[in-house]
Image (cartoon, rainbow, N blue to C red):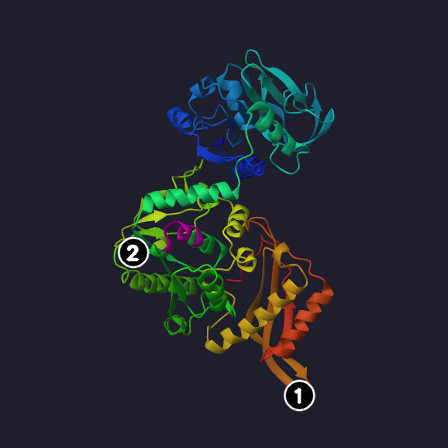
C-alpha cells in the first residue's frame, strides 16, 4: 500500500485515485499521524501532498521528521517537497515570481521518475515558494524557466520531490511519473482490485458482526444498494433493510428496487408506505429549506419506528464513501476504521445507540460502481445517476401535491427514456425534469391552452462540486419536448436549462 500524507491539498483525493488506478491500494492520512501508526500500516511508499501553506508559517502542517528514517521511499509534491527540503537541511524562500498554471519542464536526469519521456514537456505549477538550497546528497532532476529546482532526487535514500503537480491532467506524463514511483522505486504489486476488496470486506464484516443484527436505511441509490449487498453477502438474513416510500420517488423506482435487490439478490427489505404522511406534512409548503427539513425529520421518525420493531439489532449500516470520510475530518483529513461506534448517525436519534458499519468508506464513487458489478448488482442500478434525498420535492417549484407529482414523474420518465435511448445516460452526471410554478398560454389542436411548464436539466461533472450544462443534440431535445407535451397531461411548454455550477446549483431547490 501507499500512504498519502494530507498537507491540505485540494488534490489529495486525486493523488489517491491515481495510485489506485494502477491497482495499488492507497489511503489518505492526516499529517498528525504518528510514525508508530505508519509502521503498523507498513506502506511500500509515502507521498507527501501539496498544500496552501508556506513552510515557514507558524501553523503550517508538519509530520514527525522521523518519517525520513523509516527506510521507505518518499515522494514530496509541491508543499510536500518543501517540507522534505526544509526538514532535511535545505532552504525554501518566497519565489521572486509566483508560478501558477502551465510551465515547460526541462528534464536534466531521467531516472527514475522521468524515464522513457522526452527531454521537455508541459507540467502544471501552483506555488509561491521555491527551494533555493538542497539538502545533502540531493540533485536537481528538472527545471522550468522560472523555477531552477523543479524536481529533486536523493537516489540513495529514494527520496524524490516535484515542485509541480503530476496528479492533475494538465501535467503531461504525470500518470507515468506516479507509475514509475510505484513500481520502479517502491516495487509495488498490482493487487488492489474489487475482488480482493470484496473478499476482505466480507471477512471484516463477518468478524465484527458475528451473529448480531444490522439495520440499514435503503434509498435505492448506488451507495446504499452496494453497501447493503456487501453486508448481506457477509451476514445474510441478519441484515434488515428499511425502504421508506415517501411518495417523492421517480416512476417505477420502488418496483425496480424490489426486482433488483429483493428478487435478484434476495435482500431482506421492509418496504414502508409513508406516502400520505409526507404529502400531509408538505401540504402548502413552498420554501425549499422547509421542505428539506420536513422530509428529513419525518424520514427519521418513520425509520426509527420501524427500527425499534427489530429486536437485538446492534449495528447500523451506511453507504458512506471515502470522499465523505476525508472531508468530514479536520482541515487535513484522513480516514477512520471500517467499523466504529457512533451514536447520532445522519440525524438519527441518540437513543439508537448502534455501532456504525460503513463497508464502502475506503472507496471512491467509480470504485463503488465496480464493486457493485463484482457483487452481481444489475447494471441499471449500478450506473444510476445521483438522486437527492428529498426526491421530487425539490424538483417541483412551489406546492407539492399528488397531481403535480404525477405530472413530474411522467415527464421525467420520458426524459430519462430518451437520454438512455440516445446512449447518453452514463455520460451525464445528472439529467432530470423540473416542474415550474408557472403556467403559460399555448395552442393544442384548435384550442387555446393555459398549462404547466417543464424545465430539462442535464449536466456533466466529475464530482458535483462544479458542473457544466450538457450540450444535448437539438434533435434529441426536440424529440423529448414533443413527447412530453403530447404524452403528459397539463404540459404545453418545455425549456432547457443552460446554467453551469457555479453560479447555479445542479438541483433547482
* Residue at image location 60% in from the left, 65% down from the top: 416
Magenta region's main secondary structure?
helix
Residue 349, numbered label: 2
- Disc nearest the viewer among 2 and 1: 2
In the drawing, does residue 500 fall left or right of residue 248? right
Residue 447, numbered label: 1
Q: CA distance from mark 2 to mark 1?
A: 55 Å
Q: Secondary structure at mark 2?
A: loop
Front residue of this view, candidates 324 and 441:
324
* 276, above or below 68, in the image: below
Q: Is residue 19 visible?
A: yes
**x and y percentages locating residue 259 in the rendered image:** 49, 65
* Sequence-first tag of 2 and 1: 2
In the drawing, does residue 287 fall left or right of residue 458? left
In the drawing, does residue 68 fall left or right of residue 170? left
Magenta region, residue range: 229-236
Q: Secondary structure at mark 1?
A: strand
Q: Is residue 340 visible?
A: no
* Residue at image location 42% in from the left, 54% down from the top: 228
Amino acid at each position: 500500500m501507499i500512504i498519502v500524507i494530507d498537507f491540505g491539498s485540494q488534490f489529495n483525493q486525486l493523488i489517491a485515485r491515481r495510485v489506485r488506478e494502477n491497482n495499488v491500494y492507497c489511503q489518505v492520512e492526516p499529517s498528525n499521524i504518528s510514525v508508530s501508526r505508519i509502521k503498523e500500516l507498513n506502506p511500500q511508499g509515502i507521498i507527501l501532498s501539496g498544500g496552501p501553506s508556506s513552510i515557514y508559517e507558524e501553523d503550517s502542517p508538519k509530520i514527525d521528521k522521523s518519517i525520513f528514517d523509516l527506510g521507505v521511499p518518499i515522494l514530496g509534491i509541491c508543499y510536500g517537497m518543501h517540507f522534505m527540503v526544509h526538514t532535511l537541511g535545505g532552504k525554501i524562500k518566497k519565489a521572486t515570481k509566483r508560478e501558477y498554471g502551465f510551465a515547460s519542464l526541462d528534464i536534466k536526469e531521467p531516472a527514475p521518475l522521468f524515464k522513457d519521456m522526452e527531454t521537455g514537456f508541459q507540467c502544471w505549477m501552483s506555488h509561491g515558494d521555491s527551494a533555493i538550497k538542497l539538502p545533502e546528497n540531493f540533485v536537481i532532476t528538472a527545471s522550468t524557466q522560472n523555477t531552477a529546482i523543479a524536481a529533486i532526487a536523493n537516489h540513495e535514500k529514494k527520496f524524490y520531490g516535484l515542485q509541480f503537480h503530476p496528479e492533475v491532467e494538465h501535467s503531461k506524463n504525470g500518470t507515468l511519473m506516479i507509475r514509475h514511483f510505484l513500481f520502479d522505486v517502491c516495487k509495488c504489486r498490482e493487487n488492489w482490485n474489487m475482488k480482493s476488496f470484496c473478499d476482505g470486506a466480507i471477512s471484516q464484516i463477518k468478524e465484527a458482526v458475528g451473529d448480531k443484527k444490522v439495520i440499514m436505511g435503503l434509498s435505492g441509490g448506488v451507495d446504499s444498494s452496494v453497501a447493503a449487498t456487501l453486508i448481506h453477502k457477509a451476514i445474510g438474513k441478519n441484515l434488515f433493510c428499511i425502504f421508506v416510500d415517501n411518495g417523492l420517488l421517480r416512476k417505477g423506482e420502488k418496483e425496480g428496487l424490489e426486482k433488483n435487490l429483493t428478487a435478484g439478490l434476495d435482500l431482506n427489505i421492509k418496504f414502508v408506505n409513508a406516502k400520505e404522511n409526507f404529502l400531509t406534512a408538505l401540504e402548502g409548503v413552498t420554501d425549499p429549506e422547509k421542505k428539506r427539513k420536513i422530509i428529513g425529520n419525518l424520514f427519521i421518525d418513520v425509520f426509527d419506528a420501524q427500527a425499534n420493531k427489530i429486536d437485538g439489532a446492534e449495528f447500523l449500516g451506511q453507504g458512506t464513501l471515502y470522499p465523505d470520510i476525508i472531508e468530514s475530518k479536520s482541515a487535513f483529513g484522513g480516514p477512520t476504521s471500517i467499523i466504529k461506534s457512533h451514536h447520532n448517525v445522519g440525524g438519527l436519534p441518540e437513543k439508537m445507540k448502534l455501532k456504525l458499519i460503513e463497508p464502502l468508506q475506503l472507496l471512491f464513487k467509480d470504485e463503488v460502481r465496480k464493486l457493485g458489478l463484482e457483487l452481481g448488482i444489475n447494471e441499471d442500478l449500478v450506473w444510476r445517476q445521483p438522486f437527492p434525498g428529498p426526491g421530487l420535492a425539490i424538483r417541483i417549484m412551489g406546492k407539492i401535491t399528488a397531481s403535480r407529482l404525477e405530472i413530474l414523474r411522467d415527464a421525467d420518465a420520458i426524459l430519462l427514456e430518451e437520454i438512455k435511448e440516445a446512449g447518453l445516460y452514463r455520460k451525464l452526471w445528472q439529467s432530470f425534469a423540473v416542474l415550474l410554478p408557472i403556467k403559460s398560454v399555448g395552442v393544442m389542436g384548435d384550442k387555446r391552452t393555459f398549462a404547466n411548464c417543464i424545465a430539462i436539466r442535464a449536466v456533466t461533472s466529475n464530482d458535483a462540486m462544479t458542473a457544466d450544462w450538457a450540450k444535448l443534440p437539438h434533435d434529441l431535445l426536440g424529440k423529448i419536448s414533443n413527447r412530453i407535451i403530447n404524452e403528459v397531461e397539463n404540459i404545453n411548454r418545455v425549456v432547457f436549462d443552460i446554467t453551469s455550477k457555479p453560479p447555479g446549483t445542479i438541483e433547482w431547490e
